[in-house]
Image (cartoon, rainbow, N blue to C red):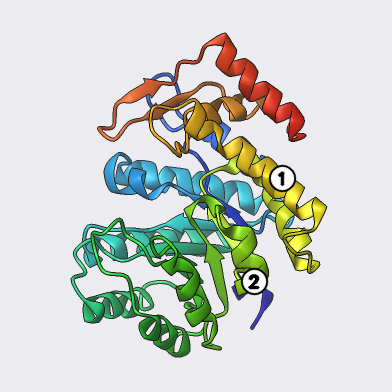
């Protein structure tokens, strides 16, 4: 297997920046990609699936991906650019995948897909048929995300192994997100199949150290790009063989969890992926504002008190981010 087809390591999912008039801030999107790239990540992923399915137009989707591909084409040794590619049905997902393949062909940039099941896939046969059809559209690695918020069943391990065996240049990469503790058993089952090349941790990496040191997860996907430097440090230590009682590994992971805890402490809903984390991106000199689109596509600002800003800044200093 060539290095070009290998997917492993930290893959932060970029947060979409917005201008005051509601457009994708492509300049800031590039700054975000540059930041995580300089941290040493293996790949960058964009856009969040909720945006693809709900608030991004087809034109915005292509604009953002072309912006990242153009940046990668002029950057020495850039990380792989991975496009999130969900769909309400298979036809919609395949149409998006064709856009990504066209951008890759036109720019020559290493790209990939993060592709969960179509929302209307009712059974294993429909899931497998979709991914076989997808393999007829793209010629790049595809990370299969196994959880779709209950909209469709999870793909059986045997289906994932069969796809990896039949399309070795495309499949064999899995972002495993089974609910609860089932995720650990599923990871172990997947890695029993030699066709499965990489299993990556999801759910913001809250079980990553256990999964990486005890099960064999070889990377993480999380919508927290501000903490890319911590991701890279954690991954490097695990690749050295460090275990959970290693002070450096435990310390780096504790710092990451400390920053993630801001989403529980300063946001209206637990485990918020934006909210105070947008201020972290501001303090890093990447974002211009804390604007985001809500589920209805409305641009909203995230207000913060002086006390809340102080808390974020103090944690950033402790974790070595500023």
Q: Residue at 37% of width from left, 58% of height from top?
A: 85
For label 1, count other residues whose C-alpha is less than 10 Å away and answer few (under 14), some (14-19) or many (20+). many
Q: Earlier in the sequence, mark 2 or mark 1?
A: 2
Q: Position of residue 262 (x, y in %)?
A: 55, 31
Query: Left of 227 or right of it: where is 319?
Result: right
| Label number found at residue 154 | none
In the foreground, 181 or 241: 181
Image quadrant containing the C terminus: top right
Q: Percent from the top left, x then y, of residue 107?
A: 55, 58
Residue at image mark 2: 214
Identify the residue position indicated by label 1 in the image: 229
Q: What secondary structure is marked by label 2? A: helix
In the picture, measured across the screen, residue 123 lies left or right of residue 9, that is left
**How far is disc 2 from disc 1 in space, using C-alphas?**
23 Å
Given residues 75 and 213, the one toward you in this image is: 213
Q: Is residue 163 above or below residue 143?
A: below
Looking at the image, residue 132 lies above or below residue 246: below
Q: Residue 112 vs residue 85: left or right? A: right
- Viewer-proximal residue among 15 and 102: 15
Asked which quadrant contains residue 120, the reply is: bottom left
- Residue at position x 47%, y 54% in the image: 203
Vertical placement of residue 37 versus 103, above or below: above
Q: Secondary structure at mark 1?
A: helix
């Amino acid at each position: 297997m060539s290095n070009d087809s290998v997917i492993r390591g930290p893959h932060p999912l970029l947060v979409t920046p917005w201008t005051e008039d509601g457009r994708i801030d492509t300049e800031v999107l590039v700054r975000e990609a540059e930041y995580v790239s300089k941290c040493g990540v293996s790949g960058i992923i964009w856009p969040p699936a909720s945006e693809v399915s709900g608030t991004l137009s087809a034109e915005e989707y292509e604009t953002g991906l072309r912006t990242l591909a153009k940046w990668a084409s002029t950057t020495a040794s850039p990380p792989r650019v991975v496009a999130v590619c969900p769909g309400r049905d298979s036809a919609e997902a395949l149409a998006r995948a064709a856009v990504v393949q066209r951008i890759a062909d036109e720019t020559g940039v290493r790209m990939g897909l993060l592709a969960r099941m179509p929302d209307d896939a009712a059974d294993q046969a429909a899931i497998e048929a979709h991914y076989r059809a997808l393999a007829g559209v793209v010629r790049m690695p595809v990370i299969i995300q196994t959880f779709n918020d209950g909209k469709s069943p999870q793909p059986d391990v045997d289906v994932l192994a069969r796809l990896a065996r039949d399309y070795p240049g495309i499949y064999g990469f899995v972002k495993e997100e089974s609910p609860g503790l089932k995720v650990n058993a599923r990871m172990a089952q997947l890695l029993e199949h030699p066709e499965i090349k990489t299993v990556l941790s999801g759910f913001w990496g809250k079980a990553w150290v256990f999964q990486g040191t005890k099960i064999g997860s070889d990377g993480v996907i999380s919508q927290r790009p501000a903490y890319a430097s911590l991701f890279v440090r954690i991954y490097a230590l695990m690749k050295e063989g460090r275990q959970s009682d290693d002070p450096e590994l435990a310390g780096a992971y504790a710092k990451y969890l400390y920053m993630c805890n801001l989403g529980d402490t300063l946001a209206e809903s637990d485990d918020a992926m934006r909210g105070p984390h947008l201020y972290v991106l501001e303090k890093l000199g990447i974002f211009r504002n804390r604007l985001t689109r809500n589920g209805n596509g409305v641009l909203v600002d995230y207000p913060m008190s002086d006390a809340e800003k102080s808390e974020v800044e103090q944690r950033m200093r402790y974790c070595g981010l500023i």
